[in-house]
Amino acid sequence: MKLRIFNRNLAGKHGVSTLTSKIWDFTGTAILNLFMFLFLLAYLSPLPFMVIASLTPSDQFLDANAPILPSTRVKFNYEGKDLIVYHVPTENGIKQWALYKPSRQFSDFIDPQNPQAGPIRWDGQWRGLKAVYKFQPTLDNFKEFLGITKLPLLFKNTLAIALISEVGVLLSSIAVAYGFSRFRLPGGKYLFFLLIATIMIPSNITLVPTYFLYSGHMLNWIGTWLPLIVPHFFGSAILIFLLRQNFKSIPRDLDEAAMLDGAGPLRILVSVILPQSIPVVTTVALLHFFYIWNETRYTSLYLGIAPNLQTISFGIQRSQSFFFTPEALMVGALVVMVIPVIVLFISQRFFMQDMIVTQIEK
Amino acid sequence: MAMENVTGVIVAQKIVKSERIKREVWIGLIFLSPWLLGFILLKALPILAALIFSLTNFQMLDPAGTKFIGLDNYARFFGDLQAGASLFGSLGYFLLTVPLEMVVALVLAGIFTSARLKSKRMSRTLLFMTSIIPATSIFFIFLGTLQYAERILVDRMGLPPINGFGLLLPFMALWSIGPGFLIMLSAMESVPNELYEAARVDGAGPLARFIYITLPMISPAIFFTLVVNLTGAFGGSVLLDRGYILRFSLSPMEGYINQMMFTESELGYASALAWVTFAVMMTLTVLLFRSASRWVYFPEEDEVANI
């Protein structure tokens, strides 16, 4: 038994493959890739619905018989009036007629093919008829949405807050992670435990006192960007942790070589550690960017009174309360997620590649 | 004479060495200083302040009427059914969503290690993409999809209507696998190949290799994901923050505290609740860390402090 398995592997390794093993190989690959394809299809299936909904005229959902894809009712202009066209069952099969004069028991219709013939009387309740639709996506939802939200302003604010705080969080987190990964400190182990513990502190517990700190009683920062930016200049515990784990996995030999050449600690960080940490630094920068982009809680707390300083997620959430149609809400949902998704696709070469959370010696 | 010289050199070396260690400590502290300062100003002091608030009847609307009321807020918590329900709700939220999230992430990561899978980079980005969608969007995506599903399945195909709203939690969990998936995948990719080769020679099949080699080797990554998810369920930091739907959090306990803070303006009681949550979470984390020595594989003695 053992020997047979051994032999099969040997055969595979040295390319002495038989026809059956080739077929086996091919089906295995096909099944695996098909599974992944189907999984992704199901996994991402809600996204197309959102795009479809955002292109759908808002009155379409009121009609239960309306098609799934964005469409409008077919209309026929008769004597200067737009009449809605219905599927009307007659003795000669189903006709597409425009409703001219609706009544309870019978209604008058116009045949668009032959309008000169005048109104045709049809016996039956017109409310039971199905309207004729034609496929026609609309951008009206986007226009309505852009009319209500100050998108360029929100976008500019978010970008400014993201970039300024990005500089702060990167500078400080990289420095602290370097400090944790390369310097032997008395009690350094406990300091590191403290760092991990900070990750687990629920944000609620610090919320009231920090709000008090930023309020008019002490710093008077409410209604400015400062409470959203300044805390990031002290580093972020979870980002420091990720950076530190990756810095630690870089061999020390390189530092020591640079040290012998007379390089100081800062020089080693910039020219030895950072060039080897591009993926993790990119990851950390992006994690922070996504955080700022999605963040609404602190914005609502500190910028709730300053509509011109708000960020995109909060601004769109706020404007969503003005919309009544689900389609316009979908537009908001689509607009707010587009930029992070594009950023993710651009950076996919580096983003979260080799995320080492604990070292496994290779 | 010569002897004295040698001792002199040794003493000088010792002084130089201790000077170097002292210097290392100072430089290290300078590098750590941003975080140390932030920790004291924005974490330690506010947490202590919250502890003091929790012993008072501090109310936003009436700050002048603040009085020291001892442990009354904590006593109130034990009588507050809704607070207890929210706390268990958070725990339930963790127990419901996290295993689903982690098992799916683990299986997908396992599939991704196969060399036979094509266009991996695109697939992993697509899998990750859903995890960065802001909370603002995700709720409407879910509702919209539900609406369409109803139109197609119920109106057109005549299936019996179901209450799809209960699917929100599993949906959110599945759409949040990104970070866990990539962390486990990175861990799997760094498992030394020789281990698999050796197991193969011993006749272990793919499933046996996954259970006996992959799982133990990536247990630190699993542990890390578990801790981060636990943190998230009680309102701590997570790798990817989706933000809130206005002030609503998906964590019931966090939601209840926010309600006390913003709707009821009872800052004293809210602080007490936050402290209770903090204590519960820390207890759970300590238990998790205690259990780690039984099932998490740490490559070096020194590395126990790593996570």
Image (cartoon, coloured by chain):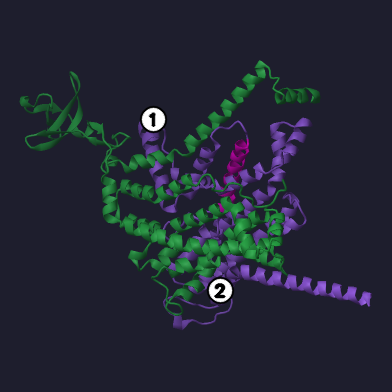
Q: Is residue B155 left or right of residue A281?
A: left
Where residue A323 is drawn, which disc sits there? none
- Residue that label 2 marks: B41
Residue occupying the point 40% across, 34% down? B153
Q: Amino acid at mark 2?
A: Leu
In the image, which residues are magenta? Answer: B93-113
- Which secondary structure dominates the residues rendered in magenta? helix
Q: Amino acid at mark 1?
A: Met
Furthest toward the front, the residue is: B1
Q: Is residue B166 visible?
A: no
Q: Chain of mark 2?
A: B
Q: Decide: is B37 above or below A148.
A: below
Q: Residue A362 appears at what percent x and percent y? A: 72, 45
Q: Residue B183 appears at what percent x and percent y? A: 61, 48
**Marks 1 and 2, how far apart in space?**
60 Å
Q: Decide: is A170 above or below A339.
A: below
Name the quadrant containing residue A266: bottom right
Q: Front-most of B74 and B281?
A: B281
- Residue that label 1 marks: B157
Mark 1 vs 2, N-terminal side: 2
Chain identifier, colour purple: B
Tell me the mark number nearer the camera, choosing from 1 and 2. 2
Residue occupying the point 50% across, 55% down? B241
Q: How many marks?
A: 2
Q: Chain of mark 1?
A: B
